[in-house]
Image (spheres, rainbow, N blue to C red):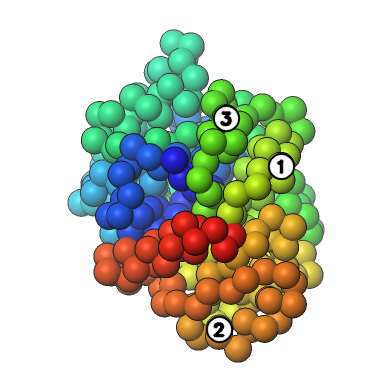
């Protein structure tokens, strides 16, 4: 069994490669749920949905989120009612949120609902929300504290980032089974996700972090930064806000006490020796996942590193 820590689009693309070479049933993906929020009374879980839609083949490939060929009739009507429509929820996507919200109201846990959704969509990988409790990433800006999605999408990541807050993490327990999965894993892969608002939210759950620190298994990270720019999202602004260097080295430094191997892009090969000085082994390959071949190759290289136990 292999465990992957995952955020949204980057991790989803990496998993597309991984399922080509590993039996999906042997993959356990612990997914960030701190981007989750409520809109129009509906419970939205962006990262879970991005991975689910990607692995089921229905994702909008250009965006990396939402459903392919979706329409926006509902949003257009909401806009007529003068409702906020900054979060682009397609009509088909809304069905997922309606179904999830109804099941939550009937008393099911997010992890149970995720299993049901995956079954309906033919996703065989085990997707596990990091917790069934509410944890929310909030950004402290000079104008106040706002939800991460509001910061990133409504306000287009323009505010200065003063602090990242993982609200609710202090009291959150891992979803049942996560600690055993970590204990019994052959190795842990950290997807090319945002270290601050995807991976660190998972690590902000104390018992998960402790379990990862206690295992003697390879933990391998993949850089979400290529040539000093994040492949997607506002990671550069978040890192800058926290005084971090925006580079694969900056990410390696952040993961220093967790990983022993880090996969970086060919463009960044001159950072290898600096990262090695942190006590981290470095693997250099093409990490820009433009097509399935590259995704599969990245997955194979990461897996080989894990199997060779160079973690
Ligand atoms: N990302 C955007 O940049 N703009 C959107 O309007 C947007 C809508 C959206 C709807 C459903 C969903 O599952 C994801 C959506 N995303 C959107 C992506 C998502 O919010 C972020 O990429 C993740 O939260 C970051 O991991």
3 and 2 marks in contact (CB < 8 Å): no
Which residue reaches farthest left?
Answer: 69
- How crowded pointer 2 is (Cα within 10 Å; few <14, some 14-19, many 20+) is rated as some
Tell me the element at label 1: helix
Name the one closer to the observer, 219 or 54: 219
Tell me the element at label 3: helix
Which label number is shown at residue 180?
A: 3
- How crowded pointer 3 is (Cα within 10 Å; few <14, some 14-19, many 20+) is rated as few
Q: List x then y, in percent, for residue 297.
A: 34, 68
Disc 2 within 8 angstroms of ligand 1 (CB): no
Name the one closer to the observer, 160 or 187: 187
1 and 2 marks in contact (CB < 8 Å): no
Q: List x then y, in percent, for residue 178.
A: 56, 31
Residue located 50% across and 78% down the image:
284
- Residue position for label 1: 214
- How crowded pointer 1 is (Cα within 10 Å; few <14, some 14-19, many 20+) is rated as few
Give left or right: position of 167 versus 30: right
Residue located 39% across and 46% down the image:
51
- Residue position for label 2: 268
Gap between marks 3 and 2, in whole Å?
Answer: 36 Å
Mark 1 and mark 2 lie on one chain; the one further toward the N terminus is 1
Q: Nearer the viewer, mark 3 or mark 2?
A: 3
Which residue reaches farthest top?
Answer: 106
Residue located 53% across and 70% down the image:
263
Asked whether residue 188 appears in the rendered view, the answer is yes
Res 24 → quadrant:
top left
């Amino acid at each position: 069994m292999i465990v992957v820590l995952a955020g949204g689009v980057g991790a989803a693309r990496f998993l597309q490669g991984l399922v080509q070479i590993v039996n999906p049933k042997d993959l356990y993906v612990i997914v960030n749920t701190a981007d989750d929020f409520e809109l129009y009374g509906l419970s939205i879980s962006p990262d879970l949905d991005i991975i689910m839609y990607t692995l089921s083949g229905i994702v909008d490939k250009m965006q990396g989120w939402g459903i392919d060929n979706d329409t926006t009739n509902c949003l257009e009507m909401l806009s007529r009612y003068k409702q906020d429509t900054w979060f682009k929820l397609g009509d088909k996507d809304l069905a997922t949120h309606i179904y999830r919200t109804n099941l939550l109201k009937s008393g099911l846990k997010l992890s149970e609902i995720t299993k049901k959704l995956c079954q309906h969509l033919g996703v065989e990988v085990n997707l596990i929300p990091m917790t069934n409790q509410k944890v929310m990433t909030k950004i402290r800006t000079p104008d106040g504290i706002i939800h991460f999605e509001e910061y990133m999408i409504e306000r287009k990541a323009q505010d200065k980032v003063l602090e990242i807050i993982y609200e609710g993490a202090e009291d959150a327990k891992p979803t049942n089974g996560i600690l055993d999965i970590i204990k019994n894993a052959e190795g842990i892969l950290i997807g090319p996700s945002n270290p601050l608002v995807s991976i660190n939210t998972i690590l902000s759950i104390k018992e998960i972090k402790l379990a990862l620190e206690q295992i003697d298994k390879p933990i391998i990270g993949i850089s979400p930064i290529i040539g000093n720019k994040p492949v997607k999202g506002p990671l550069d602004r978040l890192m800058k806000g926290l005084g971090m260097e925006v580079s694969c080295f900056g990410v390696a430094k952040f993961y220093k006490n967790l990983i022993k191997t880090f996969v970086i892009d060919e463009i960044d090969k001159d950072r290898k020796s600096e990262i090695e000085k942190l006590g981290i082994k470095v693997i250099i390959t093409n990490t820009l996942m433009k097509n399935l071949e590259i995704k599969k190759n990245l997955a194979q290289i990461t897996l080989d590193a894990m199997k060779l136990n160079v973690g």
